[in-house]
Image (cartoon, rainbow, N blue to C red):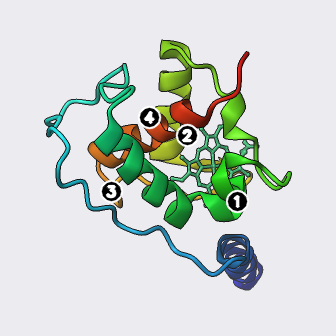
Amino acid sequence: MKTSHTLGVIALLSATLLLSHGNVTPQPVDTKGLAPLGKDWLEKNPYVGNETAIEIGKHAYAENCARCHGLDVVSGGVAPDLRYLDPGVEGDAWFMERIRGGAVRNGNVYMPKFEGIINQEAMWAIRAYLFSVKIDH
Ligand code: HEC
């Protein structure tokens, strides 16, 4: 009993350490000015090319994603370079899966989950921003 308890504490500690490099916890995002999307999760980005969304997404990215995925979406190698995400609906789906659920393997948090912290509008705004800086495929 004692051993498994200790192991649990170690796992918790290392997850916290992974999360804390760069000392930023997920930040809520103000999505005022964007058309509300309702409760159901959309499959396709409704904000492609929407200037307000791109602007909101840019700030949200800088606050929540840049420390791992790189300033201005140029990855320094810590996490995947998001300019290379598939630009179509498949990319939309993968983006949503990751941003909502994060990336956890063997109990290690590689990327925190954002569902419950930022709303769907903020998530698609970030995707609209990423799309606006994407490189040619
Ligand atoms: C603590 C670091 C960290 C933060 C903060 C973070 N990510 Fe990640 N992200 C990662 C890592 C590491 C991976 C790769 C996970 C893996 O290898 O399974 C990843 C994977 C992804 C992927 C999948 C990329 C691919 O090519 O498969 C997407 C999309 C993504 N992140 C988006 C975001 C967005 C958007 C934000 C901000 C809202 C964000 N991430 C914040 C570390 C982070």
Q: Which x, y percent locates residue 79?
A: 76, 50
Give how far across and how far down residue 103 sits, in percent.
Answer: 63, 47
Callout in the foreground (4, 3)? 4
**Is 13 situated left or right of 92 in this image?**
right
Mark 3 is surrounded, within 10 Å at the Cα level, by few (under 14), some (14 to 19) or many (20 or more) other residues, namely few
Q: How far apart are marks 4 and 2 (CA)?
A: 16 Å
Dot 3 falls on a residue whose secondary structure is: loop
Q: Quadrant of the C terminus?
A: top right
Element type at marker 4? helix
**Disc 2 secondary structure class:** helix
Tell whether circle 4 marks a residue whose Cβ is less than 8 angstroms from ligand 1: no
Q: Distance between the residues labelled 1 and 4?
A: 19 Å
Q: Does the residue labelled 2 lie within 8 Å of ligand 1?
A: yes
| Direction from residue 34 to residue 68 in the image, left or right | right
Front label number (4 vs 2): 4
- State the SS at label 1: helix
Question: Given the image, on which type of amino acid does mark 4 rest?
Answer: Ala
Residue holding disc 4: 128
Q: Where is residue 23 in the image (x, y as percent from the top left)?
A: 63, 81
| Residue type highlighted by circle 1 | Cys
Residue ID for mark 1: 68
